[in-house]
Image (spheres, rainbow, N blue to C red):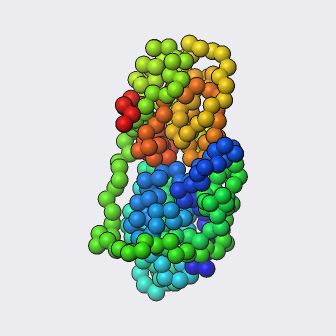
Amino acid sequence: MSFKVLSTGLQALFQDRGRFGFASSGVSSSGVFDRAAAARANYAVGNLADATVIEVLLGGFELEALHPATVIFCGAQSLIKVKSLNGPDKDALSNTIIDLEAGDRIFLNIPDRGMRSYLAVRGGFKVEKVLGSASSDLLSHIGPAPLQAGDELHIAQDVQPKPWWPTLRHLPLRWPLQKTNTLEVVPGPRADWFSAASQNSFYSTVFEVSQDSNRIGIRLNSANPLERVQTGELKSEGMVRGSIQVPPGGHPVIFGADHPVTGGYPVIAVLTAQSSNLAAQLAPGDKIRFSKVTPE
Protein backbone atom coordinates (compact mmCIF):
# COMPACT_ATOMS: atom_id res chain seq x y z
CA MET A 1 0.00 0.00 0.00
CA SER A 2 1.07 3.60 -0.50
CA PHE A 3 -1.55 5.73 1.29
CA LYS A 4 -3.83 5.53 4.28
CA VAL A 5 -7.09 7.49 4.27
CA LEU A 6 -7.41 9.59 7.43
CA SER A 7 -10.56 11.53 6.52
CA THR A 8 -12.88 11.52 3.51
CA GLY A 9 -14.92 14.68 4.05
CA LEU A 10 -18.47 14.50 2.69
CA GLN A 11 -17.69 12.07 -0.10
CA ALA A 12 -14.64 10.60 -1.81
CA LEU A 13 -15.02 8.25 -4.78
CA PHE A 14 -12.74 6.33 -7.10
CA GLN A 15 -13.42 7.46 -10.66
CA ASP A 16 -11.95 7.08 -14.12
CA ARG A 17 -13.29 8.11 -17.53
CA GLY A 18 -16.25 5.74 -17.07
CA ARG A 19 -17.75 2.49 -18.31
CA PHE A 20 -19.11 2.66 -21.82
CA GLY A 21 -21.22 0.30 -23.91
CA PHE A 22 -23.67 -0.86 -21.25
CA ALA A 23 -26.53 1.62 -21.65
CA SER A 24 -28.68 -1.10 -23.23
CA SER A 25 -28.34 -2.98 -19.93
CA GLY A 26 -29.37 0.05 -17.90
CA VAL A 27 -25.85 1.05 -16.81
CA SER A 28 -24.73 4.62 -17.45
CA SER A 29 -21.16 5.60 -18.27
CA SER A 30 -20.69 7.25 -14.85
CA GLY A 31 -17.04 8.32 -14.43
CA VAL A 32 -15.55 11.63 -13.34
CA PHE A 33 -18.09 14.47 -13.27
CA ASP A 34 -15.59 17.16 -14.34
CA ARG A 35 -13.77 15.31 -17.10
CA ALA A 36 -11.47 18.19 -17.97
CA ALA A 37 -10.21 18.58 -14.38
CA ALA A 38 -9.52 14.86 -14.00
CA ALA A 39 -7.75 14.70 -17.36
CA ARG A 40 -5.64 17.67 -16.40
CA ALA A 41 -4.64 16.06 -13.11
CA ASN A 42 -3.61 12.81 -14.79
CA TYR A 43 -1.69 14.62 -17.51
CA ALA A 44 0.15 16.77 -14.97
CA VAL A 45 1.67 13.74 -13.22
CA GLY A 46 2.38 11.82 -16.44
CA ASN A 47 -0.44 9.27 -16.18
CA LEU A 48 -2.42 7.54 -18.87
CA ALA A 49 -5.66 9.33 -19.64
CA ASP A 50 -7.79 6.61 -18.02
CA ALA A 51 -5.80 6.29 -14.79
CA THR A 52 -8.02 6.12 -11.71
CA VAL A 53 -8.32 9.28 -9.62
CA ILE A 54 -10.21 10.19 -6.45
CA GLU A 55 -13.12 12.62 -6.77
CA VAL A 56 -13.54 14.60 -3.54
CA LEU A 57 -16.76 16.47 -2.83
CA LEU A 58 -16.06 19.88 -1.23
CA GLY A 59 -13.04 19.02 0.93
CA GLY A 60 -12.03 17.71 4.33
CA PHE A 61 -10.06 14.90 2.67
CA GLU A 62 -6.78 13.77 4.26
CA LEU A 63 -4.25 11.10 3.33
CA GLU A 64 -1.04 9.85 4.89
CA ALA A 65 1.68 8.84 2.44
CA LEU A 66 3.30 5.52 3.36
CA HIS A 67 5.79 5.73 0.49
CA PRO A 68 7.16 8.63 -1.59
CA ALA A 69 4.62 9.80 -4.16
CA THR A 70 3.85 12.70 -6.48
CA VAL A 71 0.28 14.03 -6.46
CA ILE A 72 -1.89 16.90 -7.63
CA PHE A 73 -5.41 18.16 -6.92
CA CYS A 74 -7.27 19.76 -9.84
CA GLY A 75 -10.82 21.07 -10.15
CA ALA A 76 -12.25 23.18 -7.33
CA GLN A 77 -10.08 26.02 -6.04
CA SER A 78 -8.79 24.93 -2.63
CA LEU A 79 -5.96 25.39 -0.15
CA ILE A 80 -3.90 22.26 0.48
CA LYS A 81 -1.87 21.67 3.62
CA VAL A 82 1.05 19.26 3.80
CA LYS A 83 2.27 18.22 7.24
CA SER A 84 5.77 16.86 6.76
CA LEU A 85 7.25 14.21 8.98
CA ASN A 86 10.84 15.38 8.50
CA GLY A 87 10.53 19.03 7.56
CA PRO A 88 8.47 22.20 7.77
CA ASP A 89 4.76 22.12 7.01
CA LYS A 90 3.79 23.52 3.60
CA ASP A 91 0.77 25.19 2.07
CA ALA A 92 -0.12 24.84 -1.59
CA LEU A 93 -3.04 25.54 -3.89
CA SER A 94 -5.02 23.37 -6.25
CA ASN A 95 -3.23 22.73 -9.56
CA THR A 96 0.12 22.37 -7.78
CA ILE A 97 2.27 19.26 -8.26
CA ILE A 98 3.34 18.09 -4.79
CA ASP A 99 6.07 15.59 -3.86
CA LEU A 100 5.30 13.61 -0.71
CA GLU A 101 7.67 11.62 1.46
CA ALA A 102 6.73 8.65 3.64
CA GLY A 103 4.93 9.92 6.73
CA ASP A 104 3.71 13.16 5.13
CA ARG A 105 0.04 14.04 5.50
CA ILE A 106 -1.86 16.00 2.88
CA PHE A 107 -5.16 17.74 3.65
CA LEU A 108 -7.61 19.30 1.19
CA ASN A 109 -9.51 22.26 2.62
CA ILE A 110 -13.05 23.26 1.70
CA PRO A 111 -12.79 25.06 -1.66
CA ASP A 112 -13.20 28.78 -2.13
CA ARG A 113 -14.99 28.11 -5.43
CA GLY A 114 -16.21 24.88 -6.97
CA MET A 115 -17.43 21.58 -5.60
CA ARG A 116 -15.24 18.72 -6.80
CA SER A 117 -11.51 18.14 -6.64
CA TYR A 118 -9.62 15.37 -8.41
CA LEU A 119 -6.60 13.77 -6.77
CA ALA A 120 -4.18 12.10 -9.15
CA VAL A 121 -1.07 10.24 -8.05
CA ARG A 122 1.73 9.37 -10.42
CA GLY A 123 0.85 5.84 -11.55
CA GLY A 124 -2.85 6.13 -10.73
CA PHE A 125 -4.74 4.33 -7.98
CA LYS A 126 -4.94 0.54 -8.18
CA VAL A 127 -8.63 -0.42 -8.05
CA GLU A 128 -10.53 -3.55 -9.10
CA LYS A 129 -12.62 -2.75 -12.16
CA VAL A 130 -16.27 -3.62 -12.71
CA LEU A 131 -17.49 -3.78 -16.32
CA GLY A 132 -14.17 -2.36 -17.42
CA SER A 133 -14.14 0.67 -15.13
CA ALA A 134 -13.04 1.66 -11.62
CA SER A 135 -15.78 4.29 -11.35
CA SER A 136 -18.27 4.41 -8.48
CA ASP A 137 -21.81 4.75 -9.87
CA LEU A 138 -24.05 6.05 -7.09
CA LEU A 139 -27.29 5.41 -8.98
CA SER A 140 -26.63 1.83 -10.10
CA HIS A 141 -24.45 0.97 -7.08
CA ILE A 142 -21.82 -0.45 -9.40
CA GLY A 143 -18.11 -0.14 -8.79
CA PRO A 144 -16.04 0.43 -5.65
CA ALA A 145 -17.68 1.69 -2.49
CA PRO A 146 -17.08 5.27 -1.35
CA LEU A 147 -13.78 5.66 0.47
CA GLN A 148 -13.74 5.50 4.27
CA ALA A 149 -11.26 6.55 6.93
CA GLY A 150 -8.78 3.73 7.47
CA ASP A 151 -8.82 2.51 3.86
CA GLU A 152 -5.43 1.56 2.44
CA LEU A 153 -4.71 2.69 -1.11
CA HIS A 154 -2.30 1.23 -3.63
CA ILE A 155 -0.60 2.83 -6.62
CA ALA A 156 -0.87 1.31 -10.10
CA GLN A 157 1.52 1.67 -13.04
CA ASP A 158 -0.73 3.64 -15.39
CA VAL A 159 1.96 6.03 -16.60
CA GLN A 160 2.64 7.39 -20.07
CA PRO A 161 5.17 5.35 -22.11
CA LYS A 162 7.40 8.43 -22.25
CA PRO A 163 6.62 10.20 -18.98
CA TRP A 164 7.31 13.88 -18.75
CA TRP A 165 7.70 16.35 -15.93
CA PRO A 166 6.70 19.99 -16.39
CA THR A 167 9.08 22.69 -15.31
CA LEU A 168 5.98 24.62 -14.22
CA ARG A 169 4.88 23.01 -10.96
CA HIS A 170 1.84 25.23 -10.47
CA LEU A 171 -0.65 25.11 -13.32
CA PRO A 172 -2.79 28.15 -14.16
CA LEU A 173 -6.48 28.14 -13.27
CA ARG A 174 -8.60 26.50 -15.94
CA TRP A 175 -11.55 28.84 -15.49
CA PRO A 176 -12.78 31.42 -13.01
CA LEU A 177 -16.22 30.77 -11.55
CA GLN A 178 -18.41 33.86 -11.78
CA LYS A 179 -21.30 35.17 -9.70
CA THR A 180 -23.52 34.13 -12.59
CA ASN A 181 -22.12 31.41 -14.84
CA THR A 182 -23.20 30.92 -18.43
CA LEU A 183 -23.66 27.34 -19.61
CA GLU A 184 -23.75 26.68 -23.34
CA VAL A 185 -26.44 24.36 -24.68
CA VAL A 186 -27.80 23.04 -27.94
CA PRO A 187 -31.60 22.88 -28.28
CA GLY A 188 -32.98 19.54 -27.14
CA PRO A 189 -35.09 17.03 -29.04
CA ARG A 190 -38.25 18.08 -27.18
CA ALA A 191 -37.87 21.86 -27.20
CA ASP A 192 -41.11 22.02 -29.17
CA TRP A 193 -42.96 20.72 -26.11
CA PHE A 194 -42.59 24.24 -24.70
CA SER A 195 -44.18 27.48 -25.80
CA ALA A 196 -42.09 30.14 -27.50
CA ALA A 197 -42.42 32.22 -24.34
CA SER A 198 -41.11 29.37 -22.17
CA GLN A 199 -38.23 28.72 -24.56
CA ASN A 200 -37.30 32.40 -24.42
CA SER A 201 -37.64 32.31 -20.63
CA PHE A 202 -35.28 29.32 -20.49
CA TYR A 203 -32.54 31.41 -22.10
CA SER A 204 -33.25 34.68 -20.29
CA THR A 205 -33.87 33.40 -16.75
CA VAL A 206 -31.16 33.30 -14.08
CA PHE A 207 -31.55 29.93 -12.35
CA GLU A 208 -30.30 29.01 -8.88
CA VAL A 209 -28.71 25.64 -8.10
CA SER A 210 -30.77 23.71 -5.55
CA GLN A 211 -29.33 22.03 -2.47
CA ASP A 212 -31.02 18.87 -3.74
CA SER A 213 -28.27 18.26 -6.32
CA ASN A 214 -25.71 15.48 -6.69
CA ARG A 215 -23.83 13.38 -9.27
CA ILE A 216 -27.13 12.08 -10.62
CA GLY A 217 -28.68 15.45 -11.36
CA ILE A 218 -28.42 19.18 -10.67
CA ARG A 219 -31.79 20.69 -9.84
CA LEU A 220 -32.48 24.32 -10.72
CA ASN A 221 -34.95 26.75 -9.22
CA SER A 222 -36.41 30.00 -10.52
CA ALA A 223 -39.35 32.28 -9.81
CA ASN A 224 -41.01 31.41 -13.12
CA PRO A 225 -41.37 27.67 -13.83
CA LEU A 226 -41.33 26.66 -17.49
CA GLU A 227 -44.67 25.73 -19.01
CA ARG A 228 -45.33 23.04 -21.59
CA VAL A 229 -47.63 23.31 -24.57
CA GLN A 230 -47.79 19.52 -24.71
CA THR A 231 -48.93 18.07 -21.40
CA GLY A 232 -49.31 14.42 -22.38
CA GLU A 233 -47.07 11.59 -21.28
CA LEU A 234 -43.78 11.05 -23.07
CA LYS A 235 -42.44 7.55 -23.64
CA SER A 236 -39.09 6.98 -21.97
CA GLU A 237 -36.17 8.00 -24.18
CA GLY A 238 -32.43 7.54 -24.04
CA MET A 239 -30.58 10.19 -22.03
CA VAL A 240 -27.02 11.51 -22.13
CA ARG A 241 -24.85 13.44 -19.71
CA GLY A 242 -25.84 17.10 -19.79
CA SER A 243 -29.46 16.52 -20.83
CA ILE A 244 -31.78 19.12 -19.28
CA GLN A 245 -35.13 17.59 -18.43
CA VAL A 246 -38.13 19.60 -17.33
CA PRO A 247 -40.47 17.73 -14.93
CA PRO A 248 -44.14 18.77 -14.59
CA GLY A 249 -43.21 21.34 -11.92
CA GLY A 250 -41.33 23.35 -14.55
CA HIS A 251 -37.93 23.43 -12.80
CA PRO A 252 -35.11 22.05 -15.00
CA VAL A 253 -32.81 19.21 -13.97
CA ILE A 254 -29.34 18.81 -15.51
CA PHE A 255 -28.33 15.15 -15.81
CA GLY A 256 -24.95 14.50 -14.21
CA ALA A 257 -22.34 11.75 -14.41
CA ASP A 258 -24.52 9.08 -12.76
CA HIS A 259 -27.68 9.94 -14.67
CA PRO A 260 -30.29 7.29 -15.53
CA VAL A 261 -29.98 5.98 -19.06
CA THR A 262 -33.63 6.74 -19.86
CA GLY A 263 -36.06 9.47 -18.89
CA GLY A 264 -39.70 10.32 -19.40
CA TYR A 265 -39.68 14.12 -19.18
CA PRO A 266 -39.02 16.35 -22.20
CA VAL A 267 -35.43 17.49 -22.78
CA ILE A 268 -35.43 21.20 -23.63
CA ALA A 269 -31.66 21.43 -24.21
CA VAL A 270 -28.36 19.59 -23.78
CA LEU A 271 -25.16 21.03 -22.33
CA THR A 272 -21.99 21.12 -24.39
CA ALA A 273 -19.11 18.97 -23.13
CA GLN A 274 -17.28 21.98 -21.71
CA SER A 275 -20.37 23.26 -19.92
CA SER A 276 -21.04 19.78 -18.50
CA ASN A 277 -17.63 19.99 -16.84
CA LEU A 278 -18.43 23.43 -15.46
CA ALA A 279 -21.77 22.16 -14.14
CA ALA A 280 -19.88 19.64 -12.00
CA GLN A 281 -18.40 22.55 -10.05
CA LEU A 282 -21.67 24.39 -9.34
CA ALA A 283 -22.53 24.71 -5.65
CA PRO A 284 -25.98 25.13 -4.09
CA GLY A 285 -26.96 28.78 -4.40
CA ASP A 286 -24.83 29.42 -7.49
CA LYS A 287 -26.54 31.31 -10.29
CA ILE A 288 -26.52 30.22 -13.93
CA ARG A 289 -28.03 31.17 -17.25
CA PHE A 290 -28.12 29.26 -20.52
CA SER A 291 -26.76 30.36 -23.89
CA LYS A 292 -27.78 28.67 -27.14
CA VAL A 293 -24.99 27.54 -29.47
CA THR A 294 -25.01 25.82 -32.85
CA PRO A 295 -23.87 22.18 -32.77
CA GLU A 296 -20.62 21.59 -34.64
How many dots with numbers?
Answer: 0
Which residue is at a point 43% across and 31% down the rendered structure image?
186
Q: Quadrant of residue 46?
A: bottom left
Tell me the quadrant of the picture where the N terminus can be found: bottom right
Seen as rendered, the residue at the extreme bottom is 86
Residue 261, image x and y in percent? 63, 40
The reply to whether residue 73 is in sight is: no
Residue 132, image x and y in percent? 62, 60
The reply to whether residue 237 is in sight is: yes
Relative horizontal placement of residue 139, taking residue 220 as reference (left or right): right
Residue 117 against residue 26 in the figure, above or below: below
Residue 215, image x and y in percent? 59, 46
Which residue is at a point 61% across and 42% down the rendered structure image?
259
Tell me the quadrant of the picture where the C terminus can be found: top left
Please name whichever residue, 148 or 21, is drawn nearer the observer in this view of the structure: 21
Q: Quadrant of residue 172?
A: bottom left
Which residue is at a point 50% across and 62% down the rendered structure image?
50
Relative horizontal placement of residue 122, taking residue 146 as reference (left or right): left
Residue 11 against residue 86 in the figure, above or below: above
Relative horizontal placement of residue 160, taking residue 137 as reference (left or right): left
Which residue is at a point 28% across and 73% down the rendered structure image?
167
Residue 223 against residue 18 in the figure, above or below: above
Please name whichever residue, 181 or 165, is drawn nearer the observer in this view of the structure: 165
Please name whichever residue, 79 or 115, is drawn nearer the observer in this view of the structure: 115
Q: Quadrant of residue 76?
A: bottom left
Residue 15, image x and y in percent? 57, 59
